[in-house]
Amino acid sequence: MSNELKFLAGLTARGQLDRRAFLGRAGALGLTATLANTMLGSAVHAAGPQKGGTMKLAMSGGQSSDTLDPALASNEAVFMVVKHFGDTLVEVAPDGSLDMRLATAVRGTPDAKTWTFTIREDVKFHNGDKMTAADVVATLRRHAGEKSQSGALGQLKAVEKVEDIGGEVVITLSEGNADLPYIMSDYHLVIQPNGGMDAPDAGVGTGPYKLTSTQHGIRYTFEKFADYFDDTRGHADAVELLVISDDTARTAALQSGQVHMINRIPPKIAGLLGRAPNVTIHSAGGRSHYAFLMHCNTAPFENNDLRLALKYATDRQQMVDKILFGHGSLGNDMPINAAYPLFDDSIEQRAYDPEKAAMHYKASGHEGPIILRTAETAFPGAVDAAQLFQQSAAAAGINVEIKRLPNDGYWSEVWNKQPFCTSYWGGRPTQDGMYSTAYKTDAAWNDTRFFSDEFDTKLLAARSETDTMKRKGIYSDMGRQVRDTGGLLCPMFANWVEGTNDKVAGWFDDPSQNMMNGYATIKCWLTA
């Protein structure tokens, strides 16, 4: 039985036998579906990546106002587009270690103020030009410049100068930052010809796939870049990315075979969808969190008693149970969880307490409805979560009025503009990265308008602190400050719940971001 199944698994891995036929034969021979899939997975990896075909995926989140400028990428669809046509100096591996990409080595001074990156020499841009250290320097200068609107700007504020010295890129900081190499993995910082100074939205990079057509909010197509420097990536001949923000339509596209993979499967249907014979559900835990964002500098949310009232009025366990269905964990009104190595698990978990909520609400002096803006694109189940919040807040005497808005335009017209809305964050590799991007006073993506000189001082102190326990203590203080005085109402940390069909091989869970940190179509391959 074993030899026969191994033979059949090998045929299936090479695309010579249908997966359903293999599973049917395995079942007839008494093997459970779990063991059969494990055997098949081993055979697929043993056979190695297959080349060719057109890999198709459907993503939520894209909109007609999107741009190809990596600096401004702010939703999942464009995140994936950038990953296809661009490369960063380094990447963060699933285990949290650094992988060298456009840089082949990195070294820092003992005070962590000066960092030197050795740049790979055998790399071409899609326009045929050779990538050089000068392109890297120009890219970092553009993102760190005074007029920058880059999503990475908050992490680059300490950059004093970036230089090309003998073909190496040397970054000098105003204060030490042990996490600087991790910052270089930020997807906004893909290297562009002349740094994107001339044409930031040209969609030209060094990535494994060359952009061939663009319809923002609808469709993107790519072809394999023949001169890509790494033959272990980019197995398909072409990639097609469809923007399908409607959950029902997106899951139907996967079931029907219209696409090979999708993101953002609503947790409430993940179990049912996973029982389909040609679908596999992937659920990877990590740093992603769902959020209700309040602007701390805008009425009525400038009142911390009101913010605390809304935080205590949130039944987190109910949301985890009814929105995540086991695909996540409780949030605690801070963007950090146990996925971060310096997380302090002694910080008390905030619980639903209508009486405390009512007390803080009365102290705030607020009267009348509180408007919460939401849309399904904010996160899977965002509208349902808003309704649960409305109900739990009502028990504390707080009137929440929900405004459901269209998906298209939500990220450009609502997020980071309206004073109270639903949103999500994929997280960052380090606590410094997360706080610098969204909580430092001058961060472009400070979407809760949390402005605190005390917090900024602690952030800078933590960056240069080499004693791990002292650094953890500083981050603990920062977490408590955000939790108790910030504008983030974080009810839950959510797994990345995604799906592939039976023609996709090579998938592995990556906690960093959705779709294997954006590399699903780059590292996976088609078996037939």
Image (cartoon, grey):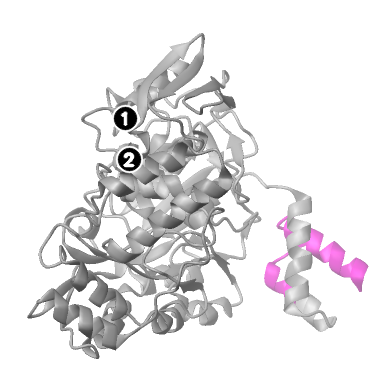
Q: Position of residue 332 (x, y in %)?
A: 40, 69
Which disc is residue 144 wearing?
A: 1
Q: Position of residue 442 (x, y in %)?
A: 25, 41
SS for dot 1: helix
User: What residue is rendered at 40% in x and 68% in y?
Assistant: 250
User: What residue is rendered at 37% in x and 38% in y?
Assistant: 155
**Whether residue 75 is situated above or below residue 141 in the rendered picture:** below
User: What residue is rendered at 77% in x and 59% in y?
Assistant: 42
User: What residue is rendered at 42% in x and 70% in y?
Assistant: 331
Q: Can you name the residue that lies furthest to the top here?
A: 166
Query: Do tag 2 and tag 1 residues touch (Cβ < 8 Å)?
Result: no
Pointer 2 or 1: first along the chain: 1
SS for dot 2: helix
- In space, the residues marked 2 and 1 are separated at their CA atoms by 9 Å
Residue range highlighted in magenta: 1-23
**Whether residue 167 is situated above or below residue 222 in the rendered picture:** above
Was residue 19 drawn as part of the magenta stretch in this picture? yes
Q: Position of residue 65 (x, y in %)?
A: 21, 49
Q: Amino acid at mark 2?
A: Gly
Q: Position of residue 391 (x, y in %)?
A: 26, 87
The quadrant in which the C terminus is found is bottom right
Which disc is residue 154 wearing?
A: 2
**Whether residue 239 is situated above or below residue 175 in the rendered picture:** below
* Relative horizontal placement of residue 467, taking residue 306 as reference (left or right): right
Near-viewer residue (224 or 148): 148
The quadrant in which the N terminus is found is bottom right
